[in-house]
Amino acid sequence: MSSLISIVGAGPGDPELLTIKALKRIQEADCILHDALVSEEILNLARPEAKKIYVGKIYQDGQDQTGRQEWINQLIIELAAKGQKVVRLKSGDPMIFGRGAEEIRFCIENGLNYEAIPGVTSALGAASLYGIPLTERGKNSMVLFGTGHYCEGDFCDLQTFVSVLNSGSPIIFFMGLNKLVHLSQRLMDLAISPEVKIQILSKVSQPDSSALEATLGTIAQILETQKPPMPALVIIGENVERLSK
């Protein structure tokens, strides 16, 4: 294992939610390539001599994402050639909107020694910490993870969102806060009840975490005066009440 690329999920922010294997790799790393949302508390678990390189992005920061990924790939190649143990540290889980698949393919194509270590995605962390049942006997048997991306002026998966909500199942939106008012209106346009609940969960598992509750019909008015901090996760569904406050 003289040269190992570890693609590691750091979880939603609380260092205690790291897996044991993730912690070991962070402590063994020669170099950590980390995203914007990885907390300082987690980065401080590395050895003092380990090099830490920020390779993240922030919403609307103007970066060219193709160029950014090519730069990350080049760093991985250069560090692997030096025989280093590299941790590519991502918030949440590498395979949930984390570009983990792209970097795994790159490692395979270039014959690199790699592994992928799962992390607690913020969606599952939020559900457990706030007591929001994503599936529950007698109510629903599935949950959808999605984003609020546009296709030709409307939401790409809007009809799927409608079908899932009509089934009584919840949808968890990553990176969806900035489009939430528009999304709520479009769902109501397609006969989803304005009473359907919305949970906005900010900075999940972190000391300054916060939660905001609304409905499709009230969210526009609420967001006029309240600004949930980023990063924020949005859960929509008729049964998404918070059992833990």
Image (cartoon, grey):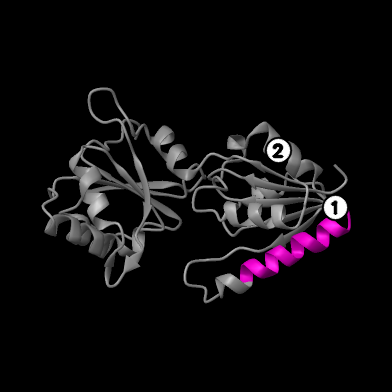
Which image quarter: residue 152? Answer: bottom left
Q: Nearer the viewer, residue 165 or 185?
A: 165
Q: At 81% across and 42% down in the image, what residue appears?
A: 28
In the rendered structure, the answer to whether residue 52 lies left or right of residue 62 reads: right
Give SS at disc 2: helix
| Amino acid of disc 2 | Leu
Q: Residue furthest top?
A: 137
Query: Residue 161 colored magenta?
Result: no
The N terminus lies in quadrant: top right
Give the alpha-carbon distance from disc 2 to disc 1, as whole Å: 17 Å
The percent coordinates of residue 34 (x first, y second) are 66, 56
Q: Is residue 180 left or right of residue 35?
A: left
Q: Name the residue rendered at 34%, 44% in the picture.
A: 144
Quadrant (top left/top right/bottom left/bottom right) for the C terminus: top left
Dominant secondary structure of the magenta stretch?
A: helix
Which contiguous range is marked in magenta?
Answer: 68-84
Please name the residue shown 81% across and 46% down the image.
47
Q: Amino acid at mark 1?
A: Gln
Residue holding disc 1: 84
Image position, residue 162 (x, y; %): 21, 50
Which residue carries the number 2 mark? 23
Give the SS element for disc 1: loop
How would you rate the neighbour count of disc 1 (Cα within 10 Å): few for under 14, some for 14-19, many for 20 or more?
Answer: some
- Of the residues under marks 2 and 1, which one precedes in the sequence? 2
**Picture quadrant of residue 159:** bottom left
Give the image location of residue 195, x and y in percent. Answer: 14, 46
Give me the disc on residue 116. none
**In this orientation, which residue lies closer to the viewer: 119 or 242?**
119
Q: Position of residue 61 (x, y in %)?
A: 52, 73
Give left or right: position of 179 versus 104. left
Mark 2, Cα crowd under 10 Å, few <14 / some 14-19 / many 20+, is some
Q: Nearer the viewer, mark 2 or mark 1?
A: 1
